[in-house]
Image: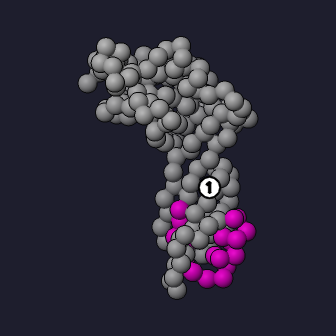
Amino acid sequence: MAIHTLAVLVENSPGVLARVASLFSRRGYNIDSLAVGPTENPTVSRMTIVLNLEGHALDQVSAQLFKLVNVIGISEMKSSDSVQRELLLVKVPANPVTKGLAAKFDAVITDENDQSLSLEIVGDKDRIEQLLTALKPHGIRELVQSGLVALERGASTLADRTLTTMGTANESSPDNKTADYQN
């Protein structure tokens, strides 16, 4: 099995996330990571989905995703052609060793008191795993980690490639709005 990262542009409307997640659930695929957020266009959201699939299954997943009414565009984000990052917030005991590890990994101390430190680190999966491995013997009190987000390198954008050819719903014009047949 191989890790695949998909960037998916979707209409910013209620129920889209549930439909995308249920598509994977129905087919028995596990989502390793899912991050969803707004884009520069208020009518469009972007999902970054990390899956562990065989090669041919990726083609099937992409085809099924594209059949969903609210999906505008899909692109596989290869690590060599994109910038990929995760965010980690972790609470650890406050002591010189954990402060030293924070400095070593360029983590930001976001909260500090006599009992604990809250650290923030943004980086690739390996960097975050290395920090967690180093902190584990000292006691991790709490952690939260975002899903992976990815942006392709260079001037080209997923929105440029898909929105100009496909169009998207425009809330100001009811005639131009894509019907939501799946609600």
Please say whether residue 70 is visible from this viewpoint.
yes
Q: In this view, does 148 lie above or below 115?
A: above
Residue at which label 1 appears: 122
How many marks are shown on the rendered structure?
1
Query: The N terminus is located in which quarter?
Result: top right
- By what rule are the colours in the image chosen? one colour
For the question of whether residue 136 can be seen, the reply is no
Check residue 92 for magenta coloring: yes
Magenta span = 89-106
**Which image quadrant for residue 28?**
top left
Q: Which residue lies furthest to the front in this view?
A: 172
What residue occupies the far bottom of the structure in this picture? 114
**Among the 4 quarters of the image, the one containing residue 175:** top left
Where residue 13 sits: x, y (%)? 34, 31
How far across and how far down the image is residue 10, in percent?
44, 28
Query: Residue at coordinates 62% horizontally, 23% vertically from top-left?
Result: 55
Residue sitting nearer the eye, 165 or 126: 165
Helix, strand or loop for disc 1: strand
Residue type at tag 1: Val
Q: Residue at x 52, y 74 (%)?
A: 111
At 72% across and 32% down in the image, what residue appears? 154
Q: Position of residue 36 (x, y in %)?
A: 46, 40
Residue toward you, 147 or 60: 147
- Count neighbours of disc 1 (C-alpha within 10 A) and say few if under 14, some if 14 to 19, many if 20 or more: some
Q: In this view, does 78 lie above or below 114?
A: above
> Which corner quadrant holds the C terminus?
top left
Q: Which residue is drawn at 55% across and 69% down?
A: 110
| Vertical side of 99 occupied by 126: above or below | above
Left/right of residue 178 with respect to residue 128 in the rendered view:
left
**Residue 157 colored in magenta in the image:** no
